[in-house]
Image: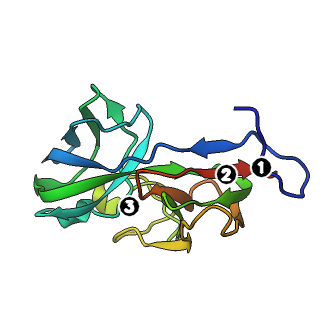
Amino acid sequence: MLSKVFYPGDYLATEISHATFKLAVATGIVLDGTTATVTSANHLLATGDYTTFSAATGVTAINNATWGPVTKVSSSVYTFPCALTGSVTGSPIQEKLYFFSAGDWIIFADVNGNLEYNVDQLLGLNSSQGGIVKGNVTGPDVWRILKIGAAVGAGSTSFTSDGFSFRFRDMGTTATSYFSKVK
C-alpha cells in the first residue's frame, strides 16, 4: 500500500492498514508446560504474530497476557511458547496483537481495535509465564487502554513507542484502523 496518513512532522512512513480483525473462537487449547497448541476453525495468524485471549476459563492466566511468537502449523492450528499447564475451558476468544516499533506514531483507531500501553513495560510475556521481560518484573501483564476504537473521523492519537510498551489489540470483525510512523 502506497498511501500515507497525513500528520505534520519530519516524514510519514507507509500507512499500515488493518481491515481484517476477525475474532476467532479457539475450539481447543492444549497446555503442556512448554508449548500451547491452539486449534481453531481459521485463526488468521501468521508465523511471528502475537496474540492474546479473553473469556477463557479453567486456566484463566491465558487471558489478557501477550503470547507468541506464533508458529503457524496450518490454517486451523498454531503453537507458541507457554509455561502454563492445565485445561483451558469455556469459549476462549483469540485477539491478534500488533506491536509498534520504536518511534513516533499516529493512529486512527476504528471500532475494530484499541491502542494499549503496558504500565509495567514488559517485553512480551512476564517471567511467571516463562517469557522475556524488561528488567526483573513478575506478575501478570498490566495493559491499559490509551485509545478506544471509535467510528472513523472520531479523531486520532499520536504517541511515542519505545518498541515494546504499545500494542494494538484486535477487537472486532469489521472496520479498518490505520497507523503510520511519523519519525
Q: What residue would you read off at disc 3?
A: 126
Kind of element beneath mark 1: loop
Which amino acid is tagged 3?
Asn
Identify the element where label 2 is drawn: strand
Question: Which residue is at a point 80% across and 52% down the rendered structure image?
Answer: 182
Q: Are marks 1 and 3 in contact (CB under 8 Å)?
A: no
User: Disc 1 and disc 3: Cα gap in Å?
Assistant: 34 Å
- Tell me whether the residue at label 2 lies in contact with that at label 1, contact meaning CB atoms closer than 8 angstroms: yes
Residue drawn at the location 65% of the way across and 49% of the way down: 101
Which is nearer the eye, 126 or 142? 142
Say if 6 sits above or below 49 in the image.
Answer: below
Q: What kind of residue is marked 1?
A: Val
Q: How is the image coloured?
A: rainbow
How many badges with numbers are in the image?
3
How crowded pointer 2 is (Cα within 10 Å; few <14, some 14-19, many 20+) is rated as many
Find residue 28 and report its horizontal and vertical position in percent.
Answer: 13, 45
Q: Amino acid at mark 2?
A: Phe
For discs 2 and 3, the disc positioned in front in the rendered view? 2
Q: Residues within 10 Å of mark 3 (few under 14, many from 20)?
A: many
Q: Give residue 123's position: percent from left, percent from top.
A: 49, 56
Say which quarter of the image contains residue 88.
bottom left
Residue 96 position, x and y percent, is 41, 49
Q: Which residue, given by chain and number where applicable, does mark 2 sit on?
A: 179
SS for dot 3: loop
Residue placed under numbered mark 1 in the picture: 5
Residue furthest top in the image: 74
